[in-house]
Image: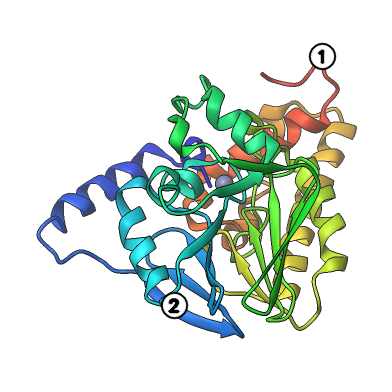
């Protein structure tokens, strides 16, 4: 998600104190939830990791964090005695790629070209360091790729820039499971990370493009949050479109960003954005992100 720029300082402090308080507790393990056919999802940290496991081996999607990658790998390997065959990164954010160096000792990591490029370059704006060579995806693709394993057709579809410029949605065709990565986060709306080539308006377009390809009865696994349905992705798109319309109306009226923020127009969406984005400061950060993209360039804040 890389939502730290949206996370108020107060919440960061609470998390830090909580981790100190729980330092003596047993190490948390990943839980496994079977979805359909060969596909399960591993959960336990702030990330969802779908797995296809069967006679042909194991395919793991995203690698969570460096500190938990070995536990993630062990959880995936409990689903089949066959080897890890492929790993997929849905985008470049560290909470989806930071375990790459651990898992890539066993199987190649596949991602869109831009994921490798961004990881190799690092990011001065966010303070992300260039990734080590062994952590970079060793197989990259342009628009689409299909893996055929475990009686499953695993389709990787690159989307236009939305959450980032390397977003890949993973369709497990036979199991009827779709992993959205972070273009969708339960309970509703995700966000576009401009430091990684994403944008709020781009995310709306990306969701409009991918929604017709998601079957109505598919199980939808978001990048973060509870296992969902297509209807919940639709709601996420609707929330983003409502936010866009509110800011467009403000810009049309000639409101400055400060005037618009003073009206607190996004407070109504508090339950429709991820929990870490629900503070007053974060919600006005969402207003700013939309305003920056919608307002005429000479008026837009940097
Ligand atoms: Zn992300």
In the rendered image, which residue does mark 1 sit on? 298
* Viewer-side residue, 237 vs 285: 237
Q: Sequence order check: which comes first, mark 2 or mark 1?
A: 2
Label 2 CB-ligand 1 distance < 8 A:
no
Mark number displayed over residue 235: none
* Residue lying at 22% horizontally and 54% vertically, measured from the top left: 18
Q: Position of residue 200 (x, y in %)?
A: 73, 42
Number of numbered markers: 2
- Dot 2 crowding, Cα within 10 Å, few <14, some 14–19, many 20+: some
* Residue lying at 71% horizontally and 61% vertically, measured from the top left: 236
Residue 255 in the image: above or below residue 227:
above
Q: Position of residue 280 (x, y in %)?
A: 52, 45
Q: Is residue 264 visible?
A: no
Mark number displayed over residue 80: 2
Left or right: residue 51 versus residue 8 is right
* Viewer-side residue, 261 vs 133: 133
Q: Position of residue 134 (x, y in %)?
A: 44, 36
CA–CA distance in space, label 2 to label 1: 57 Å
In the structure shown, which secondary structural element does the residue marked by tag 2 occupy?
A: loop
Q: Position of residue 178 (x, y in %)?
A: 69, 69
Q: Is residue 101 visible?
A: yes
Left or right: residue 300 versus residue 284 is right
């Amino acid at each position: 998600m890389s939502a730290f720029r949206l996370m108020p300082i107060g919440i960061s402090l609470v998390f830090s104190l909580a981790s100190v308080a729980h330092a003596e507790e047993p190490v948390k393990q990943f839980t496994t939830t079977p979805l359909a056919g060969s596909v399960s999802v591993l959960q336990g940290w702030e990330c969802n990791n779908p797995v296809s496991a069967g006679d042909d081996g194991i395919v793991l999607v995203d690698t969570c964090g460096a500190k938990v990658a070995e536990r993630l790998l062990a959880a995936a390997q409990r689903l089949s005695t066959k080897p890890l065959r492929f790993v997929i990164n849905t985008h470049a954010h560290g909470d989806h790629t930071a375990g790459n160096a651990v898992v890539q000792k066993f199987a190649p990591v596949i991602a869109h070209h831009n994921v490798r490029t961004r990881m190799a370059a690092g990011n001065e704006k966010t303070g992300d360091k260039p990734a080590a060579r062994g952590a970079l995806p060793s197989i990259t693709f342009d628009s689409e790729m299909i893996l055929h394993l475990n009686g499953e057709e695993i389709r990787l579809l690159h989307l236009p820039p939305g959450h980032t410029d390397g977003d890949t949605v993973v369709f497990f065709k036979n199991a009827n499971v779709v992993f959205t990565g972070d273009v969708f986060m339960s309970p509703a709306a995700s966000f576009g990370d401009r430091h990684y080539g994403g944008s709020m308006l781009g995310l709306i377009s990306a969701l409009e493009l991918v929604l017709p390809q998601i079957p109505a009865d598919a199980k939808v696994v978001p990048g973060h949050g509870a296992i969902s349905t297509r209807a919940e992705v639709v709601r996420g798109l609707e929330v983003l479109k409502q936010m866009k319309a509110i800011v467009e109306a403000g810009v049309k009226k000639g409101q400055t960003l400060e005037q618009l923020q003073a009206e607190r127009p996004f407070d109504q969406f508090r339950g429709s954005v991820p929990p870490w984005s629900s503070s007053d400061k974060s919600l006005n950060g969402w207003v700013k992100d939309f305003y920056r993209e919608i307002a005429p360039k000479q008026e837009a804040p940097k």
